[in-house]
Every structure is written in C-alpha cells, then in structure tokens.
Image (spheres, grey):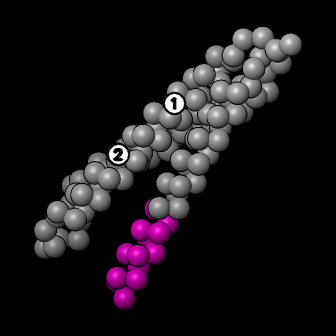
C-alpha cells in the first residue's frame, strides 16, 4: 500500500494550475493590449512587460514539470498529484509555445 501524497507532487500540481490560470489571463490581457494600441508604432511598452511575464511563467512551469517528474520517481508515495502536475504543466508549456509560434507566423504573414 502506498503512503501519503508526495509533497513534491502537491507543489507541482499547485504551481501548474496557478501558472496555467495566470498564462491564460496574460494572453487575454496581451490580446486586449494589442487590439487597443495605436497603429502608429510597431512596438509598445506593454509588449516587453507581457513578454517578460510569459518567460517567467514558462520558467515556473518548467520547474513544476521537474517537480512532477521528481514526485513520480519517489518510492512509497502516491503519484496522483505528481502526474497531474506534470500533465498540466506540459500542456501549458506546449500550448503557450504553440500560441507563440502561431503569433509569429501570423506576424510574418502580415509583414509580406
């Protein structure tokens, strides 16, 4: 019989859920900022802030994935939260990278 839940798994799950919600909010705010900006300039200060926050959140998600892997590898502990943390953080990382690539492709198409 397995023991208690792994603390690493619980932390991984918590970080991955928090980062997923924050990333969703960040993309919504970034889209609203982009839609409301004046078309005079190619850049605006909000782009840099949104970019830095996205990089920070992706780094936090990589940490959550690492903690999820560590929780899965622990002996004598339940692995549920470790697996959930790893799945959620991986989905957030892949989804964010996919949206970034999609945005870059869209921007490259507009530049032509």
Quadrant location of residue 39? bottom left
Report whether residue 31 is seen. yes
Secondary structure predominantly adopted by residues drawn in magenta: helix
Element class at badge 1: helix
Residue 82 drawn at (x, y percent): 68, 29
> Which residue is the site of mark 2?
25
Residue 5 drawn at (x, y percent): 69, 16
CA–CA distance in space, label 1 to label 2 = 15 Å
Residue drawn at (23%, 71%) of the image: 42
The boundaries of the magenta stretch are 100-112
Residue farthest along the right direction in this orientation = 1
Quadrant location of residue 106? bottom left
Left/right placement of residue 56 relative to residue 13 reads left
Residue drawn at (57%, 23%) of the image: 11
> Which residue is the site of mark 1?
15
Q: Nearer the viewer, residue 43 or 25?
A: 25
Q: How many marks?
A: 2
Residue drawn at (32%, 53%) of the image: 28
Q: Nearer the viewer, residue 22 or 111?
A: 22
Q: Quadrant of the N terminus?
A: top right
Residue 61 lies in the magenta stretch:
no
Residue 83 drawn at (x, y percent): 70, 34
Position of residue 18 relative to residue 24, above or below, is above
Left/right placement of residue 9 relative to residue 22 reads right
Left/right placement of residue 69 relative to residue 112 reads right
Residue 103 lies in the magenta stretch:
yes
């Amino acid at each position: 019989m397995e023991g208690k839940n792994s603390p690493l798994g619980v932390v991984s799950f918590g970080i991955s859920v928090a980062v997923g919600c924050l990333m969703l909010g960040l993309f919504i705010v970034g889209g609203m900022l982009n839609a409301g900006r004046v078309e005079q300039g190619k850049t605006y200060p909000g782009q840099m802030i949104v970019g830095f926050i996205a990089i920070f959140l992706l780094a936090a998600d990589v940490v959550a994935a690492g903690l999820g892997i560590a929780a899965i590898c622990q002996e004598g502990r339940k692995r549920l939260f470790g697996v959930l943390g790893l799945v959620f953080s991986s989905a957030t990382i892949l989804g964010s990278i996919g949206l970034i690539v999609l945005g870059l492709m869209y921007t490259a198409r507009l530049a032509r």
